[in-house]
């Protein structure tokens, strides 16, 4: 099954549960705009290379298109279509005035120098041109991109606009460095949001955070910050993996030391504070909570059958395959779905956009309080729908999102 079809299949089930009109489902089953750009960049050796980039604008009924940019060799139209649709449902679920989009470039950033990446990012921004903008479509970081990427995009966009608007277009991207107009707490926001979800789940179950053993797949922005924050709360992180290696320590890994190691060596491989094991052990090791924070389609049916945890929090987008999802649900392994679990990132992106618009910057405490409240409100809404519709967390999350989209479509009608 294509990833975009998988993304829509959850939506179809939720639509049935709430009796959504077929018209609306039909609209949401196609992205509004699919932008593909092929753009040339001069490499440092003097040779020219042409890259392919995408920006998929799925839906903007609730506000400007919003979603990350992924730089990865596996980026293709199907993947960005799915990621863009998930953004529409995520922003609707958490109640922020944005639509859904996603983009990317088919590239392995590790193969290029910093100077070449700077040229690629600037040329890609120029190729997208007026298809992005602070009130139209607002990219953010995702796999393979970071605050440096966002700073370059903002600078390129600002320099190709009229002098009178140069300062007011900072909000063309979120996830910028604080120095360039980014928000405090944005870098760690997705991992922080995952932890707020976990804390809420613990509260419901009557379990203390420091009783938990946790496994994390992916130690990049999301997985790394989540592991750090969970470790600070006393959770035992017993196994972590990235695209190079998997490290295990049943007594609990020393996460600050591990993160320092990753900073220096680019991977968990070779870290002496744990034992290197086969990556499949991420899925077979008994633990309380598993946090996939890498890529989509990681939890296959075969892997699901071996999993021994109580809860999966989907920090990554689309990590669980459809048949695995069904199997886990039938076997009482609870899932906090991606559109809720990793929404902390887009919530603080919304805060960054507001701060850029008002040129008034908020404190860390303000941001943390607002983030936690918005996340817990969305979580409680999902629980309410789950009980009302007698369905899974995932179906309930989509149902909440679809209700919000339906209300607006009902009021606005379909143009003309
Ligand atoms: P990142 O590039 O910072 O990190 C990705 C991590 O995954 C790296 O540690 C990498 O080694 C690991 N990885 C890649 N392939 C793997 C594999 N096959 N097996 C094991 N590990 C693998 O990316 P990120 O920003 O942390 O994003 C991770 C996930 O979170 C993605 O699904 C992304 O869409 C989602 N997400 C990110 C944000 C954000 O703010 N960055 C927000 C919401 C959702």
Image (cartoon, rainbow, N blue to C red):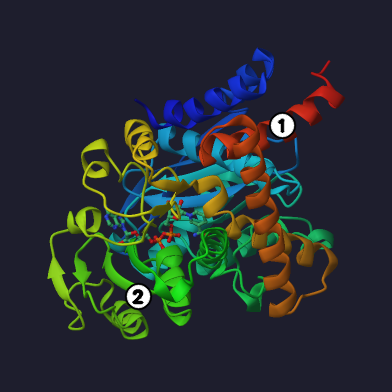
- The residue that disc 1 covers is 403
Across and down, in percent, residue 347 comes to 66, 58
- The answer to whether 19 appears left or right of 235 in the picture is right
Between the C-alphas of marks 1 and 2, the distance is: 38 Å
- The residue that disc 2 covers is 236
Up/down of 314 relative to 38, above or below: below
Across and down, in percent, residue 96 comes to 73, 49
Q: Secondary structure at mark 1?
A: helix
Up/down of 338 relative to 232, above or below: above
Q: Number of marks in the image? A: 2
Q: Residue at x 63, y 65 (%)?
A: 155
Q: Residue at x 55, y 60 (%)?
A: 197
The image quadrant that residue 231 belongs to is bottom left
Q: Residue at x 17, y 83 (%)?
A: 272
Sequence-wise, the earlier of marks 1 and 2 is 2
Q: Is residue 160 visible?
A: no
- The answer to whether 110 appears left or right of 395 in the picture is left
């Amino acid at each position: 099954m294509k990833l975009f079809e998988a993304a829509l299949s959850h939506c179809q089930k939720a639509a049935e549960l709430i009796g959504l009109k077929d018209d609306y489902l039909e609209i949401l089953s196609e992205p509004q705009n699919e932008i593909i750009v092929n753009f040339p960049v001069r490499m440092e050796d003097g040779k020219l290379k042409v890259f392919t980039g995408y920006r998929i604008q799925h839906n903007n009924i609730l506000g400007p298109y919003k979603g990350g940019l992924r730089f990865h060799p596996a980026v293709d139209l199907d993947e960005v279509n799915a990621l863009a649709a998930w953004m529409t449902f995520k922003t609707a679920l958490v109640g922020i005035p944005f639509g859904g989009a996603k983009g990317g470039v088919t590239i392995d950033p590790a193969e290029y120098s910093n100077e070449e990446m700077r040229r690629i990012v600037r040329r890609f921004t120029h190729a997208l041109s007026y298809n992005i903008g602070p009130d139209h479509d607002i990219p953010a970081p995702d796999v393979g991109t970071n605050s440096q990427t966002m700073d370059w995009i903002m600078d390129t966009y600002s320099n190709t606009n009229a002098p009178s608007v140069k300062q007011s277009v900072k909000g063309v991207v979120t996830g910028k460095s604080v120095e360039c107009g980014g928000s405090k707490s944005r870098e760690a926001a997705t991992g922080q949001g995952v932890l707020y979800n976990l804390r809420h789940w613990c509260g419901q179950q009557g379990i203390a955070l420091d009783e938990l053993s946790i496994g994390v797949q992916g130690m990049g922005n999301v997985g790394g910050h989540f592991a750090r924050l969970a470790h600070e709360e006393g959770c035992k992180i017993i196994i972590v993996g990235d695209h190079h290696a998997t490290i295990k320590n049943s007594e609990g890994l020393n996460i600050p030391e591990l993160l320092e190691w990753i900073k220096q060596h680019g991977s968990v491989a070779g870290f002496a504070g744990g034992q290197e094991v086969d990556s499949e052990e991420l899925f077979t090791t008994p633990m309380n909570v598993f946090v996939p924070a890498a890529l989509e389609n990681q939890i296959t049916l075969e892997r699901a059958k071996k999993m021994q945890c109580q809860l999966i929090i989907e920090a990554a987008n689309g990590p669980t395959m459809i048949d695995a999802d069904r199997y886990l649900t039938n076997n009482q392994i609870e899932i906090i779905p991606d559109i809720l679990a990793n929404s902390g990132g887009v919530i603080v992106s919304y805060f960054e956009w507001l701060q850029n618009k008002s040129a008034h910057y908020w404190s860390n405490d303000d941001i943390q309080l607002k983030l936690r409240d918005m996340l817990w409100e969305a979580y409680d809404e999902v629980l309410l729908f789950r009980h009302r519709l007698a369905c899974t967390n995932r179906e309930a999350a989509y149902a909440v999102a679809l209700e919000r989209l339906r209300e607006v479509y009902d009021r606005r009608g379909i143009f003309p």
